[in-house]
Amino acid sequence: MADDDKKLNVKIPDSEMAGRYANLLRITHTREEFVLDFINAVPPQPVVTARVVVSPAHAKRIAQALSQNIARYEGAFGPVADLPEPPPGGVH
C-alpha cells in the first residue's frame, strides 16, 4: 500500500458495507472509458450487481494494483489455481 493510500480516510456508507457479490466480470471500452460490469451469474438470469466506469489510465492502474495484490496474496497463501480460458467471444 502506498503512503498516500494509508492517509486516505475513506467513508463507506452502511448500505455499501456488505459489498456486492460477482462471479463474472464483463469489460467493455470506448476511446474515453472502460466499463466494468460485475455480474452475479446464477440461474435463471445473470444480473449486473455493480457497474464501474473509469478512464483508460485508471483502468491500467487498477490492473497493476490487482497484479501486485495477487502476487502478495500468493506469497502469503500459495498460488491461485488458473482456470481454463472462457470460450472465444465470451465474457472475461
Image (cartoon, helix red, strand yellow):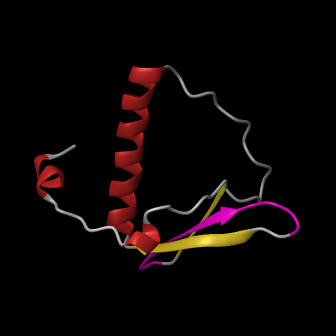
Describe residue 3's horizontal placement relative to residue 18 as left or right. left
Q: Position of residue 91 (x, y in %)?
A: 71, 59
**Residue drawn at point x = 16 percent, y = 60 percent:** 8
Q: Quadrant of residue 70?
A: top left
Q: Residue at x 64, y 31 (%)?
A: 82
Of 4 and 26, nearer the camera is 4
Left or right of 66, for residue 90: right
Look at the image and give the residue range highlighted in magenta.
Answer: 31-44
Residue 57 falls in image quadrant: bottom left
Given residues 25 and 17, the one toward you in this image is: 17
Q: Is residue 39 magenta?
A: yes
Q: Residue at x 49, y 19 (%)?
A: 78
The N terminus lies in quadrant: top left
Q: Quadrant of the C terminus?
A: bottom right
Task: Left or right? Give the position of 22 relative to 59.
Answer: right
**Against 72, is 39 above or below?**
below
Q: Position of residue 5 (x, y in %)?
A: 18, 53
Is 32 located above or below residue 7 in the figure? Answer: below
Asked whether residue 8 is drawn in magenta, I would say no
**Quarter of the image holding residue 80?**
top right
| Residue 10 location (% of width, % of height) | 23, 65
